[in-house]
Image (cartoon, rainbow, N blue to C red):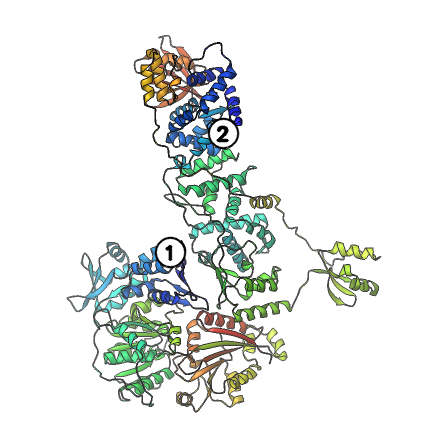
Amino acid sequence: MNESAQAAFKTLIGRYSEDTYFYLARNYLGLIQTPFHKPQLTTRMVQFFSQEAVVTSILDLLDSFDQALISLVALAGPLTVEQITRLMKEMYSYGHLLRRISNLQERMILLSDEGRLVFNPLLEEELRKRCSLRPLLGDTERALSDAPYCSTEFIRGYLSLVAKEGKCTYQDQTPSHFPTFEPKRLEQMYLALGSFMTDCGILINQDRKCSINYERAQQLLNLTDHQLICLLIAKDLEGEERLAFANALLQHLQALGGCDTNALKLLIKALCIRYQIGYSSSVLNELSTWGVLSLDEVWKVSRISDTQEQTPLIVDSDQTISYQGTCATDDILYRFAFLEVLDMQKRYRITKESLISALDSSLDFASIQAYLEQHSANKMNSALATQLSMIAEQYQNITIYDGLVLTCDTRTANLVEKLPAMAQHRLVTLAPSIFLMRRDTEEIWRQVLRSAGQLVGATRRFEQVEVIPSEEHPLLLLLIQKASQLEKSDTLGVMAAEPMGKPVLDPTLPLAIEESNLSKAQKEDTLHRYQSRMIVRKSQIAAHILNPVIEAGGFDYQGKVSLCKQASGRNDLVLELQLPEQELVVQALEIAYTPQKEALLKAAIMPTMEVKILPVSKIFLVRLVRFHLA
Amino acid sequence: MMQDTPLIVQSDKTLLLDVHHPQSEECRNDLVRFCELIKSPEHMHTYALSAISLWNAASCKIDAKYILDCLDRWSKFPVPDSVRFYVNDMATRWGKVILTKSEDPQYYELKVTDKRIRTELFNRASIAKLLVVKNETSFLLSAYNRGEIKLQLIKIGYPVDDQVQLQRGPNLPFSFREQTLGGKEFAVRNYQKQASDALLGDLGPGTGFGTIVLPCGSGKTVVAMNIMQRLSTKTLVVTTNVAAVHQWIAEILDKTTLTEEQVGEYTGAKKESKDIMVCTYQVLTYRPDKEGPFPHLELLTKGNWGLIIYDEVHMLPAPVFKVTAELQAIYRVGLTATLVREDGREDEVFSLVGPKRFDVPWNELQQQGFIAEAYCHEVRIDLPEDKEIPYALGNKREKYRIASENPKKLDVVQALVERHPDDFILIIGQYLDQLKLIADHFGLPIITGSTANAKREELYRAFKEGEQRILVVSKVANFAIDLPDASVAIQVSGTFGSRSEEAQRLGRILRPKNRSSFFYSVVTRYSSEEEFAANRQKFLAEQGYSYEIEVWDT
């Protein structure tokens, strides 16, 4: 047992109220003689929970419900009781949840850390080994589906089609390019992707034409599929940790394979708490839109593959280029060929238009040639090679420069031509003293001319041109950058190493209780704690009563009133009430009497805390539950 | 999950075959039984599963299980569920609707055991009106509506398995010659016999009709003659043009014991009445005015034929479809190099002429030496300087014409003719002025649409017999002209036609001979002609022909 765990245990237990502390100490250490030294007691508790046999017994007593609760804490991090009951309200009744959480606290499996439940540091290592998503999110083992999702390969194909059509809208023929996708879902994804990429400045819609900023697109394509999906899920969420949230969510889903809607919501909500993200039902939509989940009775999770090795390109004589697997991040095929089909085999077609589109986007022909030669499985088809060269040659016949015309005298012309510093800024010599100069380096070559003693006036404009500044989207771009640093981390094991069955109660203990010298009431109390799995060693059998009466019902009117009185005004005790048509969990506020001496319980109904007055006579059963042990 | 096999099954129901894989041949042999070959470029061939291909397979007793087993065996990756579903759904539809004869000769019995299909038939007025309920699983159908019901049902996805025995026509015994009239040894090739056997089967119910798919130059005419010979009955052959009519007649007389008294033509020029008749689609669908009846269609319906042969069945025109629907009791065969129709009416060919019964890919026949190996070349040349401005100023049509009639093409033709001093050459073009110029320049004969039939026949004969080595022809020579010795085609102009037209054009030079065939397209560089050339290149490359581009500095 490491010292830090012991120290943490001492800190936590030290913060407990006296009532709670002694309740737990007496249960586990037996009779406590006065005078006592509290730190000594704490050390004895540490020693108790450090015994291997004790730890084994405690762990043996875990059942599947306990496993679900501890798994939730492992998944979401420290949780308040209210958070747990809210998260699991679709699955279990409020009262039941309260009893079970309280029981885990009494068994010192969970301890309260300023109102949030954490693992007992002395048991934490072993408890985490027993955490599993299955009891929490459904026992059925489900395989991942091979349904299509928004991958980097999809993005490449998408961008290639945008380049081909000059628009980013979904069209009738779009499904034929993506036959693995269900058309409606594809349309949804297409629209969402268009909107996202426009927001990022990857797509630029101008003059009814959509163009691509390939530099920015490359940032997106540098991501792995996993990182890309995380980014897409996280982009509209609020919170610092949104990418980490998406990362955890995706990994847990991949581990899980599938689940029902309640379980899925539970998972999302738990991770929202862990990463301090405001829960939004849009997460479920996003998961579905990007193809991570598909609904087929239950939610099925698509396999988000790691990068698959790309086969060499088959450059065929019909000018198609196809391959299997995933392209390298800096692959340029999508820039000079148009997507035909994205399926198991991805197929692009290189056409005159596709090549021109690539050349227009500053991809030079030599790179394309080199790429094809380097990546082709077979020798490049000669007809295709000839054709491409001819197109490139024709393309180069005309060059239109974006520049500034500089007219000058002979002396300056001499400088412009001869100065080495000017060479890189001079695009073309139009006439002996007329030059086309680079517009993007205007400030630099002006400075060079000034340094050479020239007087350089302002640029003359014959007409005012409205320059539309390109939009910057720093936040989204930062998010893309952050996404590229995401790494997969550990998830909870999907199945527990030892699946929890029924708890194994030590059969010798009831006998020992029976044979002990305890009074009847003490025996009853001890036996009750044994059944609540609080007694694991014989040393805990001691002559005291910790829970005098916890339940009263039927005709035991006085018993019921007594329990109500006992719980009144106490934050650490709640009452479970069985009424003719409902069950309530309440915090008792006070007991009052009618003129006819009938007892009335004024109580706050949990979890809404709405105050009601209930005649005790109408309550069939009253049960006391320890709540918020700390 | 991945196995080392040559096939990839895609979700869009296409199958990609890696032709360099050691097992690709074996795989291909399985695929052709239930898929259509879509394209066969150098490395990766594409096949497709379609309703028609699956029904064609089902009609040959190839069921869904067999197909899926094949796909599982050959597919590199797991077969997509959507494809499994499609195969199961489509293949099992064959045999759900069976047409048989009934006790009353005026009616046929349509057996539909599937309750869901029966309900669907009831709910469609156009179908329900043709049927009379016989019992829980059968309908009665007027014999007259045999074709109509097949058409209607295939439109809603249920092919009819026609098991009604066809009628034998009047007897007309004849046999094949061992030596042709031209003096050459003759025997029906094995694959031609297999094709006939596949169609005729045991001549029992469900046989005797269908389509034979063979590449251009592989001897589809001989297959048809073999079927004619086995049935030995009155036969009508419908083909694409008059020259083809004459070639059919010449072939029949050359290779069989039938005589000129028994074989006749029915064309615009001559309307004979003999036991074996050859006519054109054009004459059958001729009508004096747009709304009037087709006077010559009676040749089909009232000829008391025992067999009808539809040559180039992919070109079957709509009115003939309509009549064919009424001729369902007659033995019939469709011949084609491709089942693909530009108008997408493959399903009607399937229903009315019959399912595909036999198919051999061209490369197999090429390997066996039955068709020639073909090389396609595109020669690009610049436009002369003096044509550049007119070209720039012209409208789309003028531009295309200027590019097509590029005078520099004459030099190219000259060089190509010199390159092939021993070959028989066809110079093909679209513009008559250009063709006349070429013909005048080289002193060559020319065949155009306006060339009299007699003159055409004479020139074809001279070409076939080696008296004339080079012919200049307009697009009239695209179809069904058998010029077996042509081994070089030089296309100087012409739009990219339909896929089938291009196949036919190439087919002119694919007849077996002891040398390779060359197909040259001469194209003006940097002009709109390049667009058509690009389409042609795509098509030919998809068909698996080698394609080279040469840039000539003339």
**Which residue carries the number 2 mark?**
A78
Tell me which amino acid carries mark 2: Pro
Task: Name the chain under label 1.
Answer: B
Residue B296 can be seen in this image: no
Total marks drawn? Answer: 2
Which of these two is toward me, A526 or B298? A526
User: Is label 1 in a helix, a strand or a loop?
Assistant: loop
Please provide percent x and percent y for residue B24: 39, 66
Distance between mark 2 and mark 1 Cα atoms: 46 Å
The numbered mark at residue B88 is: none
Q: Quadrant of residue A429?
A: bottom right
Tell me which amino acid carries mark 1: Val
Which of these two is toward me, B389 or A477? A477
Image position of B352 (left or right of B11): left
Which of these two is toward me, B77 or B98? B77
- Structural crowding at the residue carrying mark 2, measured as other residues with C-alpha within 10 Å and reported as few (<14), some (14–19) or many (≥20): many
The answer to whether B312 is drawn above or below residue A13 in the figure is below
**Which residue carries the number 1 mark?**
B79
Residue at mark 2 shares a chain with residue at mark 1: no
Please provide percent x and percent y for residue A126: 44, 31
Image position of A111 (left or right of B406): left
The answer to whether B19 is drawn above or below residue A174 in the figure is below
